[in-house]
Amino acid sequence: MIQEGRRGPPHAAVLVAVVIAVMVLPSLIGVQCEAVGEFLAELLSPLALLVLAISLIFVIRFISSDA
């Protein structure tokens, strides 16, 4: 009996996309990096960090589910 191979989520593709984005985006932003840095520092308040952590838990749970 031939079984169909079960394919999981493309973890390697997602990892490659994130690494490329982290490497390329700062060079594309260039001089505006200071303004973006200040915006991110202001955005990452304690409440924002809590929401970010909770959303990451939901994303990881969705990715690791069988659906």
Image (spheres, rainbow, N blue to C red):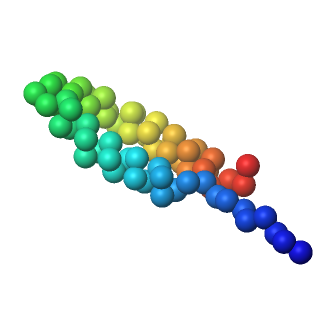
Query: From the viewer's perspective, is residue 12 above or below residue 34?
Result: below
Q: Find the residue positioned furthest to the right.
A: 1
Q: Residue at x 43, y 54 (%)?
A: 15
Q: Looking at the figure, which quarter contains the N terminus?
A: bottom right
Q: Residue at x 30, y 29 (%)?
A: 43
Q: Which residue is drawn at 18% across and 37% down?
A: 27
Q: Where is residue 65 in the image (x, y as percent from the top left)?
A: 68, 53
- In this view of the protein, can residue 48 be seen by the observer? yes
- In this view of the protein, can residue 38 be seen by the observer? no
Residue 49 found in image quarter: top left
Foreground: 44 or 46?
A: 44
Q: Where is residue 36 in the image (x, y as percent from the top left)?
A: 21, 28
On screen, residue 26 versus residue 6, left or right, reads left
Q: Find the residue positioned furthest to the front.
A: 2
Residue 39 found in image quarter: top left
Q: Position of residue 4 (x, y in %)?
A: 78, 64
Q: Residue at x 46, y 36 (%)?
A: 51
Foreground: 16 or 41?
A: 16
Foreground: 47 or 39?
A: 39
